[in-house]
Amino acid sequence: MRSVGQDGLIEGYASLFGVADLGRDVVERGAFRDSLARRGAAGVRMLWQHDPAEPVGTWLSIREDARGLLVRGRLNLAVRRAREIAALIGEGALDGLSIGFRVIEAAKGAGGIRRLVKLDLWEISIVTFPMLPGARLGAPKGGPPFPLRLAGRGHAPRNGKGTSPGLARAIRRASVRLSRPATP
């Protein structure tokens, strides 16, 4: 599903199991189980770019399957930002998903990988550049993630595939800033 209907429905994978993100985190199968049992889809917020001041809809279903965290939600088209997001999705200009969570249990993996064993999931955002490049809207019916094309700014994908080192660094820096507690 690369478009949004009049009802604002969207779906995709917010996380993929066993795949390293740009910060070298790997989510393990079952990592969301307890959190989803406790919160349900209604307890996980749908945000724009991880901004708590910009809720844009609701998640109708969130479940783990063999591939990852499959989500289905509805953009609230009465909200201006949600209408903008729907238009961008419809044009193919936007399709990223990203999770906001607290680590309950993690383990060190080979090569500096952090294996996320148990997470407290509290939000899933629609984003321009997901930390996990394969976390996309339309992923259930789609193929591999779309390559990012940002040539000329130090963000050009290598060999036309994946994410560049420059973009990976920028996303890691933004992620670190977002994970810090707010100071009054």
Image (cartoon, rainbow, N blue to C red):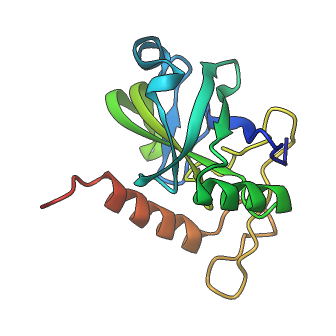
Instruction: Count every numbered label the image shows and give the total.
Output: 0
Q: Quadrant of the C terminus?
A: bottom left
117 or 84: nearer the viewer:
84
118 or 123: nearer the viewer:
123
| Any part of residue 167 in sight | yes
Q: State the image quarter where residue 87 is shown.
A: bottom right
Q: x%, y% of residue 180?
A: 26, 55
Name the residue at 22% across, 52% down: 181
Question: In the visual, does 140 lie left or right of 84?
Answer: right
Q: x%, y% of residue 46?
A: 53, 41
Question: In the visual, does 59 lie left or right of 140?
Answer: left
| Any part of residue 109 in sight | no
Q: x%, y% of residue 10?
A: 73, 39
Name the residue at 58% across, 41% down: 57
109 or 64: nearer the viewer:
64
Q: Quadrant of the N terminus?
A: top right
Q: x%, y% of residue 131?
A: 55, 53
Q: State the image quarter where residue 85 is shown.
A: bottom right
108 or 177: nearer the viewer:
177
Name the residue at 86% across, 40% down: 142
Name the residue at 37% across, 29% down: 107
